Image (cartoon, rainbow, N blue to C red):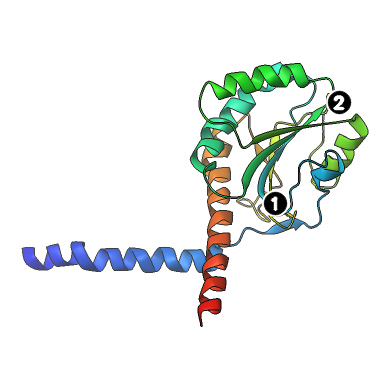
Amino acid sequence: MKKVFVLVVLFILPIVAYLFFASGINNFGKLPILTEKVSDISVIDPAYTLQDKITILGFLGENVELKKGNAFNLNQKIYKPFYEFNDFQFVMVMPKGTEAKVEELKKDLGSLGDISKWKFIYGEPDEIKTMFASLKTDLTLEENLSTPFVFIVDKDISLRGRKDDEGNGTKYGFNTSSVADLNNKMEDDVKIIFAEYRMALKKNNAERSN
């Protein structure tokens, strides 16, 4: 009996686990598109684009010093585990005039590691409001042009999220004030979108080799 038990543990359970997760990827491996054709940040700054990038898009607003905690949460929980993936970037849309405050924030973030994929672009208030409105969410931008929420934008510049978030309706963004939201939801969704692109790449490579 002991030998049978050992065989089950060593061989059968891993196969069952593989089939379970493989079926999970097939059934739940795509993060829903919530908004197509989000405005590209190149409209604000031609040096940057969302096209062909997996982007975490945020709006820190005028009072950068008050959003440092949000930025640190995001850096530790989402940026660090994923920043080495190709075509991944963090883009923070900032009001013009916050450049000095952003440099202080970058210095603080940089003390914790590589921040090369954190991008900050600067726009006029109307440009930032137009950019935010193009996401077509049920969230609002505060008067200081900030929101604690960040958004997952895919390579086709479409907003991704959850259409039925645990029975609470559509989830457009993730609250950087909540470590639980980042840990329990956003991290999973970022993993899903990376898995989706990896599967698509493998499929394309397999088709080319046939």
Q: Which residue is mark 2?
A: 143
Count up the numbered dots. Answer: 2
Q: Residue furthest right?
A: 126
- Can residue 1 be seen here? The reply is no
Amino acid on which the number 2 mark rests in the picture: Glu
Query: Which of these two is toward me, 41 or 16?
Result: 41
Q: Position of residue 178 (x, y in %)?
A: 59, 31
Amino acid on which the number 1 mark rests in the picture: Gly
Residue shown at the point (53%, 51%) measured from the top left: 191
Residue 80, relative to residue 205: is it above or below? above
Earlier-in-chain disc, 2 versus 1: 2
Residue 125, relative to residue 130: is it above or below? above
- Can residue 149 be seen here? The reply is yes
Q: CA distance from mark 2 to mark 1?
A: 26 Å
Compared across the picture, whether 73 is left or right of 46 comes to: left
Q: Position of residue 77 (x, y in %)?
A: 52, 35
Which mark is in front, 2 or 1? 2
Q: Place residue 203 in its image quadrant.
A: bottom right
Q: Position of residue 33 (x, y in %)?
A: 71, 58
Q: Which residue is mark 1?
A: 169
Compared across the picture, whether 10 is left or right of 82 comes to: left
Which quarter of the rendered picture does the N terminus lie within? bottom left
Element marked by disc 1 = loop
Query: Which of these two is toward me, 114 or 200?
Result: 114
Residue shown at the point (7%, 66%) measured from the top left: 3
Alpha-carbon neighbours of circle 1 within 10 Å: few (<14), some, or many (≥20)?
few
